Image (cartoon, grey):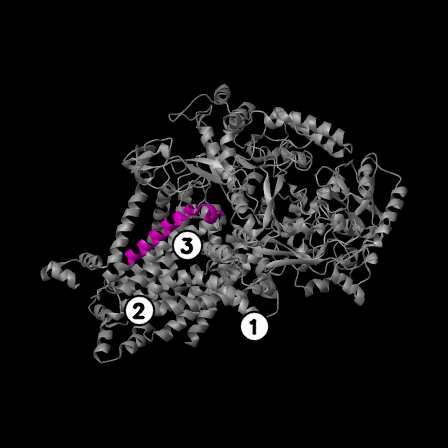
Amino acid sequence: MTEATTNAGPPRLEVASQSKLIWWAFRKHKLAMAGLIVVAILYVIAAMPGFFAINDPSAQNARTPFHPPEAIHLWSDDGFVGPHFVPSKLKRDPDTLAAIYVPEPEKAVRLVLFGHGYSYRLFGLIETDRHLFASSDPKQPFFPFGTDRLGRCVWSRIMQGAQTSLSIGLVGVALSLIIGVILGGISGYFGGRIDFAIQRVVEFVLALPTIPIWLALAAALPQDWPATLQYMMITIILSLTGWAHLARVVRGRFLSLRTEEFVSAARLDGCSEGRIIFRHMLPSFMSHIIASITLAIPAMILAETSLSFLGLGLQPPTISWGVLLREAQNVRSIATAPWLFAPGGAVVLAVMALNLLGDGLRDAADPYNK
Amino acid sequence: MGTDGKSVRGRMSRRAFLGTTTGFAGLALTSGASFAAAKEAPELAAMVAKGDLPPLAERIGENPMVVTPADRIGSYGGMWRRGLRGSSDHNGILRCVGNNGLTRWDMDFTKVEPNVAAGWDVSDDARTFVFHLRKGMKWSDGQPFTADDVVFSIEDCVKNPELYSSVPSILTSGGKPATVTKIDDETVQFQFEEPYALFLEQLATPLGQHPTLFCKHYASQFLPKYNDKLDDMVKAEGLSSWADLFRAKNGDIEIPSRWANPEKPVLDPWVVEEPYVGGATRVIVKRNPYFWQIDTEGNQLPYLDGINFGISQDVESLMLDVISGKIDLQERHINSLANKPTLAANTEKGDYHLMELVPSSANVCSIYLNMCHKDPKMRAIFEQKDFRVAMSLAMDREEIIDLIYLGQSEPYQTGPRPSHPWYFEKLSRQFTERDLDKANALLDGIGLDKKDGSGMRLRPDGEKLFFSVDVIPTLYPDLVDVLELVKSHWAEIGVDIKVNSIERALYYSRGDANDHDAQVWPGPGGLDPMFDPRDYFAAHTQGSRYAVPWAQWYVSNGTQGEEPPESQKQRMKLYDQAKATVDLEERGRLMHQLFELTADAFETVGVCLGVNTFGVCRNNFLNTPKREPDSWTYPNPAPALPQQFFFES
Amino acid sequence: MLRFIFKRVLWMIPALFAVSFLAFVLIQLPPGDFVTNYVATLAASNEIIDQNAADALRERFGLGEPMLLQYGKWIWGILVHGDFGTSFEWQQPVGDLVWERMALTLTLTLSTLVATWAIALPIGIFSAVRKYTIGDYIVTSISFFGLAIPSFLLALVLMYIAVVIFGQDVSGLFSDEYQNAPWTWAKVADLIHHLWIPVIILAVSGTASLIRVMRANLLDELNKPYVTTARAKGLSEFRLLMKYPVRIALNPFISTIAWLLPNLVSGSIVVAVVLNLPTAAPLLLQSLLAQDMYLAGAFVLLICTLTLIGSLVSDILLAIADPRIRLE
């Protein structure tokens, strides 16, 4: 905290709130700051994917299957002309049926910042057709990350998938956190019969295999719900079993903490049980909880991709990163269309950024941190 | 291929052939001549020399089947490497090893030829079938195969209610099972209640193999009738009933345990060495030393030592095996059109070539609008032919073909494929052109002329016209893509649908309970219209998804389901007649009448003709087919006779 | 202590009943049954089962009976005869099927565990002690990358590279010639040759999260006053680290043993499917997807039992590792 101290001066440090202290400490951690920025950008994208998309993510295009990524050029043969790209035309190999694209440099198309494209609803409300950037010729779509087998724009699909993948896990994690900390805390703090009872419940929940639950729920949920809502429900139900892990960890910490002097001191001072748990004990292992959460959100994102892989998660035509990766998960993509793995890059980026962010938060929240 | 003297006899037999003596004499002569030169695999010859195995002539009997190799006489040795999936892929073995019924298909999938039966006589009324077996033919353990085995299989096993609560429909006619009697050791008779001309063809399909499936001297020990101490055996194996034990030891046509017991005698070219069980990572079958077929130079078949089926959990590892040349011949699991560019690009690396597979299906995607919908309002709409015609006219089939089927198909409804003698232009091509004006006019004309704010049509009761189409993404990912396109096409005429991707069991239970609005499935019956007519009339309770209750009515002889309209009833009658008709031309005439009615009713909406797919075959693997039908009733590659495949040394 | 263990073991019995019943219900909850799934699987290859045969199957498996009766029969068989039933699909006793694959599963899981801990603990300690150094940043980035990459993707890409570029055989755990051969040194060598790819892939993600947890826990401890005191008393840095903070930082690890045991069976399903490993996980997945009741039920029961045992073991270990925790 030395840096913060010198910057702000001693008087401010003394009156600074806990959250301010954490922020000062957090700023020092460069990787964590980078993580924060990336997470912020990703969630902005998740909030308005349509704006960042270039082409309609669900629109198939018979003229552009397996189109390779196109580069943005600034200079043409005539010198600087501003951002543009070179469209190409589809030819099909008669024997192998592979798609071959022949560039047509004479037809270069300009890219327009805040240009018009397909129309969508911003935040689900405002109808607009403005995009971050768009092709100036609607007949010549621009594919920065190429297209999939149906000629759909991979970039735009990643943007759309961000919304599903990033938002969906949050709910589950939040729920399991609340239940886990409360029950784990009570169990570890009081011990005895209550501990015994809660531990049996935890064991029961932990012993439930998740995959049959998934299968069962995926099938039992009403069919007319939108796929996203179904997944959200499954996430919530999974989090109802996921809290058990956290509860066990929290309990372990409580068991070892409750004999510490500061807890005894608080008890002798006549603090209520709630105050002792939430005011004195919980903050002392806050860092561990934060580490667990930051691992849990990306774990949810990865779980989504794995479940899609097993065919149990979201199903096309819903777009999520897991669905996109499932579609790319084959030898054909590696051999002929490696750009289809771009959603994997998005997953790695998001998971890394969230982890770095949480890591920095953990360090910053540590009261003993120097 | 396979044109020894007897096949001629087989063809003649179709018309109630009688007077077999000359045929037999002639055969015995040719067979006798070939024995002199008969040769066998080196390791078998070594065993004979050591006295562990009887000489070849004793093993193959007096009347072995003579197979003409596809290209040339082969040489012995080598294991065929192939892939299986981890679960429920027993038919992957059946298709290579185990389709040895009394009859078999010719290579063109148009008529049957002799197989286990060297010939047959059919009575004029198509109710009595007499099969002539091969003298001296042996099971894989060296015991003789006789008429007793066939009688045992049907009378003692298949007709045993504790093993089969009902007799498989292929062995029944007019609701009664066949009666099988032994005439002499080499002659066996099947007697049916009602005329059943299709029986000979049915015997060539996988489901028609019961007569040659169970071996009396082995399987009888698992029947209470033949064994008093059966209860002790059941207990010793830890099973709960003798029927369980029977199935575990003898299997059935289509269950994994058929390939789980190496001790069970079979008539197949190869016998199981490493079984297909729950924990298996591969299945190995090895040469049957008593196999009853020889090539035209008298060499005993099979040429190959065996088949090594590697088990993959994921299709992608199978793809990698193909690319790296570790698979010798495979079409199953890898033949999705989307894989073709990748596999075509690696032919040199893996040293293989592609073979062409002609699907038996008529259509890649039949759309079944539920004409017996539980909701009367939806039913009233789906029932109208004009509605279905409008839906068909609104589709942009060219776009679907270009985008999803890589330009490899043509607009199609349903009906026998263009290469089939029963091809019917009107049934297959009507309403396949795109005509949005006409489609709109048709919809306006049936009271769907009101629209909501966003231009979508309203039902006569004011509700939005909306229905969901069920599809199984894990089974048919391409159909999800097709439906996405169809959704956009139909939106252009103001019809809104939901592409309902669901899990396969749910798909089935929704269909079985008639809870669906609409479902899609690849439309069958392109090459095998007699075996899978579900798109031509409501024949199949799980397949004719545009009218499941009508199919129930048909299958239950009118006791269940719902009485169908007149056109359906006529078709049901026509099909029953065709099934009983021996004469192929007469049968074709009846089916043509049926197709006429189907075309007029226009119940299913098709997208495009079933797409030719492909298989891979290593370049040194010979006598293999270049082009073959891809079907279940023609369980490829078995009808191409894998026993005469061989590796060029 | 003994009394505690005894009491816990006694409690397992009702818990097992409850879990097994719930599992039995859950497996059957999806629409359809084994026969529906069986028909659907065959249909995928356009293969048709005889209509009569499908009904006969359903009757034979007793699928028409009420669920409570099916459960009762199943549990009775297990308790009285030790009979877990017969797999619908394989017509084999379920017990044999499950145990057949356990040995290799155990080998793979333990190898992965050892690899994971051997990598993760030293790096985690290093990363905590040398916080905010270049070394820490590099280790942090790498471990997060490992955590972030979906394992099925990594598995497929590695497999593709190994097969297409290096011409290696990587799927499964044995080369063809050793698959059903008796155990010899050559077979062991072959196993090790195949084992490294799945171990690496499985360890990559496991290592990353362990490093993070280890680092986080250790940082909690390192700044505590008792460490400062110990350091002031002149204890060598290494001994100081090992004697208290590391031991206490391991505490949450031990809590995780509870779900380590069931992971032996159900963990790494995705990687096992992609890499085609002959472990229990793919069989479990198949049986669930096919609604092969008794096979899936036996697996679920096994997982539940292992969880309960694991939970007991972790409580005991927790008491040993951290003397501050009293059991009663």
Check disc 2 and give the amino acid type: Phe
Check disc 3 and give the amino acid type: Pro
Q: Quadrant of the N terminus of chain B?
A: top right
| Residue A366, placed above or below residue B519 | below
Q: Quadrant of the C terminus of chain B?
A: bottom right
The answer to which image quadrant residue B561 occupies is: top right
**Chain letter for the residue marked with disc 3 in the picture:** C
- Is residue B292 found inside the magenta-colored segment of the image? no
Secondary structure beneath disc 2? helix
Q: Do labels 3 and 2 share a chain?
A: yes
Mark sitting earlier along the chain (3/1): 3
The answer to which image quadrant residue B555 occupies is: top right
Mark sitting earlier along the chain (3/2): 2
Q: State how far apart marks 3 and 1 are (Cα).
A: 34 Å
| Residue C171 at x, y percent in the picture | 53, 58
- Is residue A345 found inside the magenta-colored segment of the image? yes
The residue under the point 78% across, 60% down is B227
Residue that carries the numbered disc 1 in the rendered image: C185
| Residue B225, placed above or below residue B193 | below
The residue lying toward the viewer, choosing from B516 and A265, is: B516
Segment tinted magenta in the rendering: A332-358
Q: State how far apart marks 3 and 2 are (Cα).
A: 26 Å
Residue that carries the numbered disc 3 in the rendered image: C150
Secondary structure beneath disc 1? helix
Check disc 1 and give the amino acid type: Trp
Side (left or right) of C246 relative to C67: left
The residue under the point 29% across, 67% down is C128
Magenta-drawn stretch, dominant element (helix, strand or loop): helix
The residue lying toward the viewer, choosing from B183 and C72, is: B183
